[in-house]
Image (tube, rainbow, N blue to C red):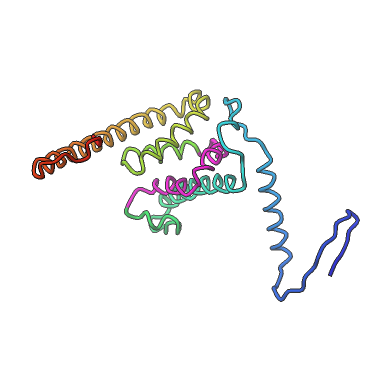
Amino acid sequence: MLSCSHDKTIRVWEQTEEIIVLQEEEEIEREKEYEAKLVEMEDVVPGMAGAEDTAAKKTVDSVRSAENIMEAVEILRDHMVNKIDDSKHVPHPLLQPYTDKPLEYFILDTMRKVKSSHLDRSLLMVSFSYVTDILKALALCVKNAYKAEFASRVILYLVQIHHPLLESSTELVPVLSELEKSTTSGITKIKHQYGFNLNALRMMLTEIEEREDTRLFKNLF
């Protein structure tokens, strides 16, 4: 069936056995329109001119990724509050895999799911009200050597784009101080571990060369 409208559009209608709920269809259309508007809007980061040039072009995927990151922070916030009020509080299903490790890892793992090409743009769209929680979580990850390289990269980027606000807020001074201590100690620990492993490999290489009376991996070390 074909139909036309006063706006000079022609629509094709096909018969189907699928049950269509108009309310759900309207909600889906509204969500699509909302996401399209977000894609068209420019990001404004206080204190950072031309921030839109530091990341890739905004897409629907980057918008959704930013929303997922903020949702992860909210899930963790709600859990911590409910845990204080109710000792028998059941964690959110997404937090179930973290019963035997720090819950802060959940925020980092959520970010790890974002495509690398969308990560900077997604972080640029995360509201500043979530940044403090994210920085605290990532600092713990670096301190515990949990995906420290990725966590360090995100920390540096967030501090870069929000530096004026972070620097001007007296409430965030302790957070930045702890962030510096945690990341420094965590990275130092990783450097020592890498150095230990490298020396162990060199010793193994020397033993093999002496035993086999040959030169291996000439340009490796």
Query: Which one is nearer the viewer's eye here, 172 or 194?
Result: 194
Q: Is residue 179 magenta?
A: no
Q: Quadrant of residue 58?
A: top right
Query: Which one is nearer the viewer's eye here, 164 or 64?
Result: 64
Q: Residue placed at 89% from the left, 55% from the top?
A: 8
Left or right position of 163 against 60: left
Q: Which residue sits furthest left?
A: 211
Q: Position of residue 21 (x, y in %)?
A: 71, 68
Q: Which residue sits furthest bottom?
A: 17
Q: Residue placed at 60% from the left, 32% from the top?
A: 52
Q: Quadrant of residue 220?
A: top left
Q: Which residue sits furthest front?
A: 214
Q: Position of residue 127 (x, y in %)?
A: 56, 38
Query: Which one is nearer the viewer's eye here, 166 or 89?
Result: 166
- Quadrant that contains the C terminus: top left
Left or right position of 134 against 59: left
Left or right position of 80 against 164: left
Q: Is residue 48 above or below residue 91?
A: above
Q: Position of residue 111 (x, y in %)?
A: 47, 45
Q: Is residue 113 above or below residue 167?
A: below
Q: Is residue 76 above or below residue 176?
A: below
- Quadrant that contains the N terminus: bottom right
The mark total stands at 0
Please give the range of residues in magenta.
101-130
Q: Residue placed at 17% from the left, 37% from the top?
A: 202
Q: Is residue 54 above or below residue 61?
A: above
Chief SS of the magenta region: helix
Left or right position of 88 against 34: left
Q: Residue placed at 56% from the left, 31% from the top?
A: 54
Q: Position of residue 166 (x, y in %)?
A: 49, 27
